[in-house]
Structures are given as C-alpha cells and as structure tokens.
Amino acid sequence: MRLVFAGTPEVALPSLRALIDSRHEVVAVVTRPDAPAGRGRTLQASPVALLAAEHGIEVLKPEKVRDSEFLARLRAIAPDCCPVVAYGALVPREALGIPRHGWVNLHFSLLPAWRGAAPVQHAVWHGDDVTGATTFLLEEGLDTGPVLGVVTETIRPTDTSGDLLERLASSGAGLLVATMDALDSGIMAAARQPADGVSLAPKITVEDAEVDWSQPAIRVDRQVRACTPAPGAWTTLAGERIKLGPVGLLPDDVSLAAGELGVDKNRVRVGTASCAVVLGEVRAQGKKPMAAADWARGTRPWPGTKLGT
C-alpha cells in the first residue's frame, strides 16, 4: 500500500522505521511545523521530519490539517492509508475520507481505557498491572474509533512512563505494520469499542506533577514514576523547587511525618501518609541531577525540615 505517515516526536520513530522496512511504500510524512528548541530556541524540525528526510521521503508540515493546500496535496498523493503515531493535532473530517483505508492511529493503551493525550502516564499513576497498544480507525471523536488490533504489555513495579512508553513504541510498531498488512490483504475487520471501561487520560501538567506528601507512599511512588521523564515530579524546600527521580519504598519506616526529611549518611528519607520513601535522584534549580545523599550534604537541611508547600 501507499502510505502517508503522520507523527511528530521520537516515540513515533520505531513505527516509521518499521513501515519503511515493510512491504508498503511510505510516500510522504505529515508532521508538526518546526518548533523552537534548545537553549537558543532555534527552530528545529521534528524527529519524524528528520528521519523522513534521511530516507528521501516527502515531508509535509501543515499549520492545520484542514489547510486547503495540504488537503490538495494529500489528494494528489492518493494514499491507500494514513498510519498515525503521536501526530499532535486533530484530523478533521475533510481529511479523514481521503485515503481509501482511512487514518489508522496507534494509541498506547487498551482502548477504551485511557483515551487522550497521556495514556501511559495515567496507567502508571493509577497502578494498572497491564496496558498495551491499540490500532484503530480515526473518527471525529476522541480515540473512539473502531479497533483493528491490540498488543498487551505488563507494567513492571519500577516502570517509569518513559520505560513503559519505550517498550510500547517498539511492540506497537510491529502491531501497526501487521495492521497495514491485514488491511492490504482484506482480512482486517474493525470492531466497535465497548461502552464499558471508558477512562480518560488528559495531559499531565507541571502543576499536576507536584508531589503530595500527604498521600500514601505507594501513590507517591506511582506519581513520581508516572511523571518521569516528563513533566518531571517536583516538590519544594524552603520555597525552592526541586525535581525528583523515582523513589524507593521503606515499608517498615513510619518514623517521619508527611513531607518530613530524614537525612542519614548515605540516604535521604521522606515521610508520607503511610511509610517513608527514600529519594533517588534530585535536581535543584539551576543544578545538574545528583544523588539525594549528595544533594543533602550540600543543602544541610535542619532536623524536622519538611518538603512541600
């Protein structure tokens, strides 16, 4: 099949590479316009655009998918299908009907669970044991289209959202190619999503990522892992914001109040509503990440000091 791939960030690259290496022809990619990045805030092309350019594939960067110039170009290309991975913009009705097999989205959850922008983060935060990836036909609703294929993935106890997304991007790439193969062969049947089991996964903001030490340790652990690497879990010490890496649970340590620091020679503990947790990596404002014990030796918090507002 002739494919036009839509995607933008690095998580879309395994799928694009797999499609390039498949029996199908990726004739163009659609990606978000160049955006400021780095300290100099210079305009940079997306990872998908850069990979496509390496392979001599046409790159389309419409400001909006409904732009008449873009729609005309898409009709001229006449793709059989438009696979989508983390494109970052809604596809309007005018575009949905152009490819004969539609737009097929790879979503990183087992739909109808965790519809929305941050399915992996929400799965980790809510303590799900299993998640996966789903291919489905795009329609105008939010991740509501009929399902074409699924692959499952166990969530490990120490998984960050970054760890889990990396595995799903890999297994999802195989699922996307298999879905293209099945559509091309005429053996793929779409199934409507069930009405039960719907949950939403809106974008997690920086404000959401502030650690609430009044929660039980297991929820603090999940929150920090869900927000790693982005947007980054954080707390405050004396009004200064510090970012936190994943923590460890200390089930037998109930000696500290919620948010209270306990500094030992080689570790830093923090109290929660249940047991204490031990901090891993800490990054103070304007500093590089460092081990929590090294951070504490430089900061020298008073006994009884508490983190958080």
Image: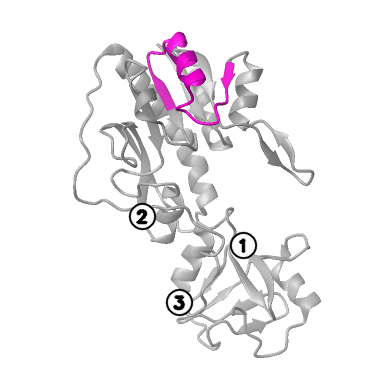
Which residue is denoted by mark 1 in the rendering?
245
Identify the secondary structure beneath mark 1: loop
Q: What element carries label 2?
A: loop
Is residue 173 visible in this depiction of the protein? no
In contact (CB < 8 Å): disc 1 and disc 2 = no
- Count of all numbered marks drawn on residues in the image: 3
Q: How crowded is mark 1: few (under 14 residues within 10 Å), some or many (20 or more)?
A: many
How is this picture coloured? Answer: one colour
Q: How far apart are marks 2 and 3 (CA)?
A: 20 Å
Residue wearing tag 2? 129
What amino acid type should be assigned to the residue bearing mark 1? Gly
Disc 2 crowd, CA 10 A, few/some/many (<14, 14-19, 20+): few
Q: How far apart are marks 1 and 2 (CA)?
A: 21 Å
The residue carrying mark 3 is 215
Q: Which of the two discs, 1 and 3, sits closer to the camera? A: 3
In the rendered image, the vertical position of residue 164 relative to residue 236, given as above or below: above
Residue range corresponding to the magenta coloring: 58-83
